[in-house]
Amino acid sequence: MEIITATEAHLPALAEMAVALWPETSYAGELAAARDILADPYQDQLIALAGEAAIGFVQLSLRTDYVEGATSLPVAYIEGVYVSPAWRGRGVGRALVQHAEIWGREKGCTEIASDTEWTNRDSIAFHGAAGFREVKRVVCFVKSIDRPTGGHSRPEEDAPPD
């Protein structure tokens, strides 16, 4: 097994694995995203190969904004990590994280971070085994807000006069 920086030739395999990791996405969307990452100096994709076969990947970004639990900036951030089911439990994921750490150090980072859904027990266990510590669990909320229909645009315009 070897881990290398992905190239244009790896894009189809990266897109296939990304859809396996994020099934709510599409192959075309992930192919475009992988292509965009190749062109972005603040992102990278490392791919694990067994011979010519792609068996895993890690998507990385260099974050310069707030990262939960981090004490320094920039932070190397694992946006996604995936290992093909047949290769799980064989050190591929750990090797991808180690290469991600090297990438981060080369970018001047002293910390690497990641996230997962709080219900993803496999990912939480993987991160713990790879040396990450959990810093926070978050529940996010969103609410639709309709545009005003009565011509008023601010709450104070609806308030009665003093």
Image (cartoon, helix red, strand yellow):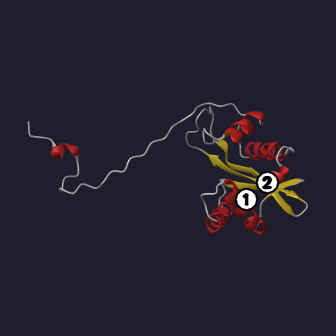
Question: What label sits on residue 84 in the rendered view?
Answer: 2
The numbered mark, 1 or 2, whose residue comes first in the sequence reads 1
Of 141 and 42, nearer the camera is 141
Q: Is residue 12 above or below residue 64?
A: below
Which residue is labeled 1 in the image?
Answer: 17
Most distant residue in the left direction: 162
Task: Kindly identify the amino acid type of the residue bearing the numbered disc 1.
Answer: Met
Of 99 and 32, nearer the camera is 32
Q: Quadrant of residue 117?
A: top right
- Residue 144 at least partly seen: yes
Q: Is residue 57 above or below residue 39?
A: above
| Residue 155 position within the rendered picture, expressed as x and y whole percent measured from the top left | 22, 44
Q: Quadrant of residue 115?
A: top right
Q: Residue at x 87, y 45 (%)?
A: 90
Q: Residue at x 76, y 64 (%)?
A: 13
Question: What label sits on residue 67 in the rendered view?
Answer: none
The residues bearing labels 1 and 2 have C-alpha atoms spaced at a distance of 8 Å
Q: Secondary structure at mark 2?
A: loop
| Residue 69 position within the rendered picture, expressed as x and y whole percent measured from the top left | 60, 32
| Residue 157 position within the rendered picture, expressed as x and y whole percent measured from the top left | 16, 46
Q: Secondary structure at mark 1?
A: helix
Are the two marked residues, 1 and 2, in contact with CB atoms closer than 8 angstroms?
Answer: yes
Quadrant in which the C terminus is drawn = top left
Residue count near mark 1 (Cα–Cα under 10 Å), binned few <14, some 14–19, many ≥20 = many
